Amino acid sequence: MEPTQRRFVMRLKKVRAQRRLSQEELADKAGVSRQYLSRLEIGRHDPSLSTLVKLAKALRVKPGELLE
């Protein structure tokens, strides 16, 4: 896993945990499948820009915050 992807994975999991959302809840809020979210969280896929924006909106953060 590349460093940028690793940071995204760690940040996504951290923010989801801070919001006390399950994968299922976040997936529903972001309009993606739970399976896809799971694959994002283990680094098997990189999100498209539109998916990154959906996740950020569902988590109430700026998209760039998921990449820090």
Image (cartoon, rainbow, N blue to C red):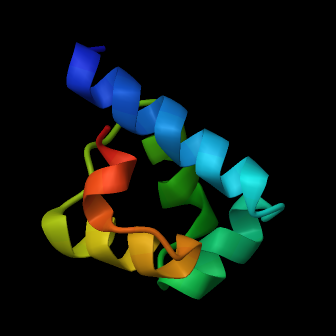
Question: In screen coordinates, is 55 left or right of 48?
Answer: right
Report whether 29 appears left or right of 62: right
Q: Position of residue 34 (x, y in %)?
A: 62, 64
Horizontally, residue 44 falls left or right of residue 31, namely left
Left or right side of 3 for 31: right
**Nearer the observer, 60 or 35:** 60
Q: Quadrant of the C terminus?
A: top left
Please tell me whether residue 65 is drawn above or below residue 29 in the rendered image.
Answer: above
Q: Residue at x 76, y 49 (%)?
A: 17
**Quarter of the figure with residue 13:** top right
Marker count (numbered):
0
Give me the residue at 37% from left, 37% from top: 8
Q: Can you say which quadrant of the picture contains the N terminus?
A: top left
**Is 18 rendered above or below residue 44?**
below
Residue 29 image offset from top left, x and y in percent: 60, 85
Residue 46, given in percent of the width and then of the height, sits at 25, 44
Q: Residue furthest left?
A: 49
Q: Position of residue 35 (x, y in %)?
A: 58, 57
What residue do we see at 31% from left, 41% from top? 45
Is residue 21 depicted above or below 12 in this figure? Answer: below
Between 34 and 9, the residue placed more toward the observer is 9
Residue at point 63% right, 83% down?
Answer: 28
